[in-house]
Image (cartoon, helix red, strand yellow):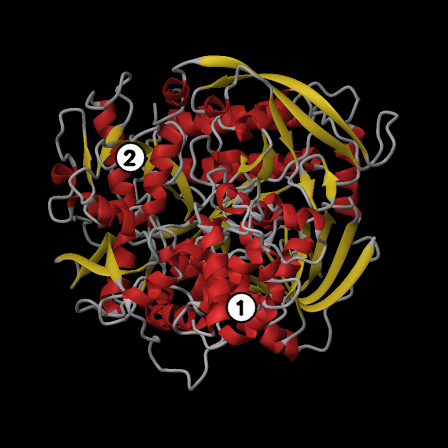
Amino acid sequence: MTATAEKTEEVGAVESFTVTLKILRHDPDGLDGREPGAEYWEEFQVEAHATDRVLDALHAIKWEQDGTLAFRRSCAHGVCGSDAMRINARNRLACKTLLKDLNPARPITVEPIKGLPVEKDLIVDMEPFFASYRDIMPFLMPSGPTPERERLQSPEDRERFDDTTKCILCAACTTSCPVFWTDGQYFGPQAIVGAHRFIFDSRDDGEWDRLEILNDQAGVWKCRTAFNCTEACPRGIEVTKAISEVKRALTSGEV
Amino acid sequence: MTNHEFDVVIVGAGGAGMRAALESSQRAKTAVLTKLYPTRSHTGAAQGGMAAALANVEDDNAEWHTFDTVKGGDYLVDQDAAEILCKEAIDAVLDLEKMGLPFNRTTAGKVDQRRFGGHTRNHGEAAVRRACYAADRTGHMILQTLYQQCIKQEVEFFNEFYVLDLILDSDPQAAADGDEVAVAGVVAYQLSTGEVHTFRAKSVIFATGGAGKVFKTTSNAHTLTGDGMGIALRAGLPLEDMEFFQFHPTGLAGLGILLSEAARGEGGILRNSEGERFMERYAPTIKDLAPRDMVARAMANEVREGRGCGPHKDYVLLDLTHLEPAHIDEKLPDITEFARTYLGVEPYTEPVPVFPTAHYAMGGIPTNVNAEVLRNNTDVVKGLYAAGECACVSVHGANRLGTNSLLDINVFGRRAGIAAAEYANSVDAAPELPADADATVAGLVASLRETVGGDGTERVAQIRKELQETMDMNVQVFRTAESLAEAAGAVKGLRERFASIAIHDRGQRFNTDLLEAVELGFLLELAEVVIAGADGRKESRGGHYREDFPTRDDENYMQHTMAYATPEGLRMDWKPVVVTKYQPMERKY
């Protein structure tokens, strides 16, 4: 007789309800008479509990109804960044979105994040996204001799870039950006967040290399301050504010 | 089939894998294969900190850290390995800082440190501030920083390549003691295409993480299915100390999501239904900061004796309400958000329901201190290395101290990377891969695909659910001969049913249905090893608690369990613990 086996249900058993998920499918293999690459909507109904997240509903579908449904996930509590998707027309992490917060009386629509090539169902090709991240040189570039002990940094200096260290590279921000959707060149908000994390780190001396990259025509000036990215960020990063701090550094010449 | 050749192939891109890659790629042609993307690994979910006796905020030294690690591990720790871990800890933290890791800082600008369970001043006098941290997202920062450095060094990644087989040049169980057995490469299944790839390599490092998904209530990611351990076992290599699994005291009740021990390090208190700070009874000196095995058992005991909280009296409470909200926001922002998001509890004003959650495998693929994989008690497999949670070196013994795992991945990941590259540079070529090197993997994939629309009546998800339930019920915090026999019978039945599964997806691209079936195969085999180890160890030590043998038995069990898969079933053996200067003594806190 041990711990939590039977008790898990009890905590979640406050109330249960039926929810409909309307999922945008993408079949790369062209099975069951479909053309390869066919897209279509499919509806599923699942039983859910009050603590269930969209990810739980997707698992219920995959595990009990249709094993072909494909999506990425790993940690299931909002830190690994695998399961960003478009849920009721907003980018969110499936593992951080509770069904009961979505008005489960109506069908919940689930689509892949926009602006990256769809591979299968909710899985997109992340490579263009990671390529933009790599482009902004997301690594510390200190100058001067390497100290024996740690580089010193005051708590105040550490605080300046704290917000942008929280990024989990889920792409929810970048793929919510209307400029990113239509402009194939734009780095997207995440790359600017990634650059911000180093530009405002007192230990780093590569800030002008990065700012020059962001000053490029694919860079920060493409941002039209739509605030979609800030709303989309599952880590609560003030993305638009970070972008505006980068813009200010470029116009003032001061970091 | 596509063939590749590298000097060093690293399997896994979490903390240990990427730390190894940073060393190896400077010295030899290196590839990193991961079934995820690099920053998705569960290192990123580690919260509270990384231990190192920097002595930045109070007196501390590596010897005190070593003692705590040995005692915390209930004397099953190999003490030579613990000495290395704690000595190299200091540079491991400083290296990360120099790579750019944004640690929290003291007012003097140094890396700040805080208290954590089982870490003490001068051999147990009082809790010491040893955990270096970045809020409650230390693992996230380590994972991101290592990935950033991998970008800088242009490390070559093969993302979403699922390694499923390890190729050795001869059968390690047929080889006599002292014979040379060497690694030849690995075989991987590319998720995006369904294609099988072979990688011939002079050195291979396994850094594949844990196996928490053998349990139902777990802090582990869905993807932590013990693949690397399972592959090693199938290749004829032993697994060490698999019965030792850590149940972290503070999982969100009913969900298992981790709430860092840092919550208690920052002053949080566990209370039962009477509001009592019950840890005062179990560990009078360091109370809520006792090692995890003791706290988890104490919590389970409170519930068992009727002092649990909630409508079903099945959890205890983690009380942070006496802490300043600003302090909580600064030091524990993520875990308090988890409580709000997933349980709707406001930690400023309400205590948080918590209960133990399966968290960490102390056991794994046996290695020596250079991360070389052992094929028996003494011989290594040439060119094969393991580091991190999938390995057992053994620095955690019967119970890992909090903050020692982020340390382990950095110290032994680095050692593995250096050793693997140096070995690769010392040999002319890797053994030739046999012409049919891909046969096992190709056969496995084909046989699963053929189940689509076939006669199979069993579902992967159902078998996995039953496995996890029987493990939670019978092999968790409390174990008995009866509960283990129950679990063994259940797993045997599930393995038989697994032969009759049918999957749904016959597609080539991103066939995650097929992937889950493969993962379940590993989980079932590993569960069997966990149960057999727990059955054979007729004592209680660290995370392994036998109600029918409630005390530690140093006379008979100062030994590591070694499990081998053979055609006749599991063969269990023992390996002596390395003791240097700390003789076993009673473990009180």
Count of residue discs: 2
What residue sits right under mark 2 in the picture? B549
Q: Residue at x 57, y 40 (%)?
A: A83
- Disc 1 crowd rating (10 Å Cα; few below 14, some 14-19, many 20+) is many
Q: Amino acid at mark 2?
A: Phe
**Frontmost residue, A125 versus B403:** A125
Q: Quadrant of residue B86?
A: bottom left
The answer to whether residue A141 of the structure is visible from this angle is yes
Q: Chain of mark 1?
A: B
Q: Residue at x 42, y 13 (%)?
A: A15
Where residue B518 sits: x, y (%)? 66, 38
**Frontmost residue, A229 versus B317:** A229
Height in image: B68 above or below B259? below
Q: Residue at x 43, y 69 (%)?
A: B100
Q: Residue at x 17, y 61 (%)?
A: B123
What residue sits right under mark 1 in the picture? B149
Marker disc for residue A175: none
Where residue B73 sits: x, y (%)? 31, 52
Q: Residue furthest bottom?
A: A145
Q: Quadrant of residue B576?
A: bottom left
Height in image: B426 above or below B71? below
Where residue B174 sits: x, y (%)? 66, 55
Height in image: A228 above or below A144? above
Q: Amino acid at mark 1?
A: Gln
- Disc 2 crowd rating (10 Å Cα; few below 14, some 14-19, many 20+) is some
